[in-house]
Image: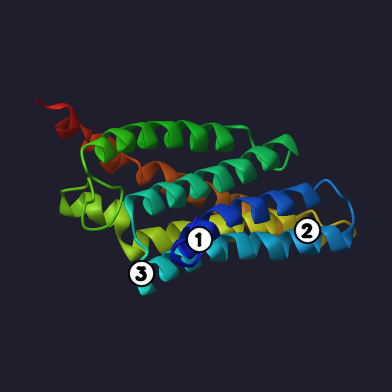
Amino acid sequence: MDIKNNTANIVSVSRIFVAFAAIGLLYVHTTSAYIWAVVLTIIAFAMDGVDGYIARKYNQTSEWGSVLDIMGDRIVEASYWTVFAVLGWLNIIFPLICIARAFTTDSIRSVALSKGMTAFGEKSMQSTAWGKFICASKFMRISYAVAKVAAFVLLIVAYIPGLCSCVADTTRLIAVILAWIAIIFCVVRAIPVVAESGKLFNK
């Protein structure tokens, strides 16, 4: 593989392992482990922006890159929601919604890809102005990302061993509120994909 011309794709895949390392540290019940989990979580989600920047700056955009980017997003996000539920930090409804949404949208997008369309960009399957805004606008994508990352980071912080109970309780409450905001964004951003999918199956 030509590493120089696949830097963006390498970053997309690498962030999965960074996230897994962070998640693994959640089972090491020490303050330092949780602090490192916070740092790695921030890095993992920052890498999602870095791969896109590299792809655009060095002309490495491709359909394969788009697939890898979405794949990385799905694996990382579903992994965090699932582990938080397993640890008892969130209700099981969060990973269930996330996974159901991922299967639904990605199944539709796989059909779109077979017809030469992508999730985002110039060949986006979204043809309506409202669909493009909800799925691909910077406002929606950044708002969703911020809510999600803030929720994940604050959840980890809230359970740092030895953290003052009053600080932990307040942080946990804020994290859960942000988690609900993030999961609502998750569902809302899937609506245009489903609503505009009919054209993919018309003869």
Q: Residue at x 49, y 64 (%)?
A: 7
Q: CA distance from mark 3 to mark 2?
A: 40 Å
Marked residue nearer the N-terminal end (2 or 1): 1
Q: Secondary structure at mark 3?
A: helix
Which is nearer the eye, 190 or 36? 36
Q: Residue at x 45, y 56 (%)?
A: 144
Q: Residue furthest front?
A: 1
Provide the residue designation for mark 3. 56
Image quadrant of residue 82? top right
Provide the residue designation for mark 2. 168
Q: Residue furthest bottom?
A: 57
Q: Secondary structure at mark 2?
A: helix
**What amino acid type should be assigned to the residue bearing mark 3?**
Arg
Dot 3 crowding, Cα within 10 Å, few <14, some 14–19, many 20+:
few
Provide the residue designation for mark 1. 48
**What amino acid type should be assigned to the residue bearing mark 2?**
Ala
